[in-house]
Image: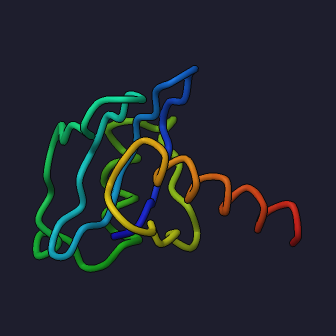
Amino acid sequence: MKLISVIHMAKGRIDGYLEIEDEYVEFESVKGQPVRIENTFPKTRYEDYESFAQVIGKFDPYTLFFEKPVEISGELTYESILEAYDKQLKSLEES
C-alpha cells in the first residue's frame, strides 16, 4: 500500500490518493476515525501510474502526485498516512 498524493491537509484530516493492490483509491482520513474510501479506480484502466496521474490532473489540475510513491507501514490509519507523508517531505528536503 502506497501514498501517491495528498490533495488536502488540515488539522486532524488528510485527503489524497493511495495505491492499494490492483486499484488507485481516493481517500479521506480523519484522526481517530477509520480511513474512508471515496472512489476506486482499477489499475487496468490505465497504462501505468503516470497515466493515472495525468487523467486525474485533467479533471483536477491542482492535484499533484508524488514522483515516487511512499510505502505505508502497518494498518491504514490517519497516523500511518501522516508518517508516510512526513517521509516524503524529508526525502524532498534531502534532495
Above or below, 27 against 45 in this view is above
Residue furthest out toward the right = 94
At 24% from the left and 68% from the top, the residue drawn is: 20
Quarter of the image for residue 23 reads bottom left
- State the image coordinates of residue 57 (x, y, percent, origin top left): 41, 47
Residue 70 appears left or right of 15:
right
Residue 13 appears left or right of 22:
right
Above or below, 95 against 59 in this view is below
Count how many numbered circles sit on residues in the image: 0
Residue 90 appears left or right of 48:
right
Quarter of the image for residue 75 reads bottom left
- State the image coordinates of residue 65 (x, y, percent, origin top left): 51, 56
At 38% from the left and 67% from the top, the residue drawn is: 74
Give the position of the C terminus as an image quadrant.
bottom right
Residue furthest out toward the top = 11
At 58% from the left and 54% from the top, the residue drawn is: 83
- State the image coordinates of residue 4 (x, y, percent, origin top left): 45, 60
Give the position of the N terminus as an image quadrant.
bottom left
- State the image coordinates of residue 9 (x, y, percent, origin top left): 54, 29
